[in-house]
Image (tube, rainbow, N blue to C red):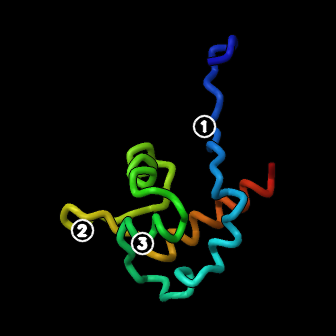
Amino acid sequence: MPESGIATPYRQQRHHLDAHADQLQRGSVAAGAPDDLLVSAEVADWLRVSIKWLEACRSSGIGPSYLKLGRRCVYRRSDVLAWLDQRAAASARR
């Protein structure tokens, strides 16, 4: 916390996929129906990250929105694309 005692706003951490977010939005996985549900392994392959990284993002609240279906976490394709769009926009502002 700064000396003023006021907390600074959360700043999104940079990740290697920020530089590739635009390209990931145009990939073959992005071409399906927006409401398609993808399992963690499919999203991890699409984003070129590990399943563990997705789990860490879920627990810290920085990854794409997800749904719980029983014990499984699934991702709506449109939510992942929206998250990539945010990452690409944030990368462009830097």
Amino acid type of the residue tagged 1 in the rendering: Tyr
Q: Reply above or below: 70 against 2.
A: below
User: For the residue labelled by badge 3, is the local secondary structure a helix, a strand or a loop?
Assistant: helix
User: For the residue labelled by badge 2, is the local secondary structure a helix, a strand or a loop?
Assistant: strand
Which label is found at residue 42?
3
**Residue at 65%, 28% in the rendered image:** 8
Give the distance between the C-alpha atoms of the residues marked 2 and 3, in whole angstroms: 16 Å
Q: Report x, y in % for residue 65.
A: 45, 62
User: For the residue labelled by badge 1, is the local secondary structure a helix, a strand or a loop?
Assistant: loop
Q: Reply above or below: 2 against 30.
A: above
Q: Report x, y in % for residue 74.
A: 34, 68
Q: Earlier in the sequence, mark 2 or mark 3?
A: 3
Q: Report x, y in % for residue 83.
A: 57, 63
**Residue at 57%, 84% in the rendered image:** 28
Q: Earlier in the sequence, mark 3 or mark 1?
A: 1
Q: Is residue 31 left or right of residue 37?
A: right
Give the distance between the C-alpha atoms of the residues marked 1 and 2, in whole angstroms: 30 Å
Residue farthest along the top direction in this orientation: 3
Give the distance between the C-alpha atoms of the residues marked 3 and 1, in whole angstroms: 29 Å
Q: Which residue is mark 2?
A: 69
Q: Classify 10 Å Cα crowding around label 3: few (below 14), some (14-19), many (20 and above).
A: some
Amino acid type of the residue tagged 2 in the rendering: Leu
Which label is found at residue 52?
none
Quarter of the image for residue 25 reads: bottom right
Q: Earlier in the sequence, mark 1 or mark 2?
A: 1
Amino acid type of the residue tagged 3 in the rendering: Glu
Q: Which residue is mark 1?
A: 10
Q: Classify 10 Å Cα crowding around label 1: few (below 14), some (14-19), many (20 and above).
A: few
Q: Classify 10 Å Cα crowding around label 2: few (below 14), some (14-19), many (20 and above).
A: few
In which quadrant is the N terminus drawn? Answer: top right
**Residue at 72%, 54% in the rendered image:** 90
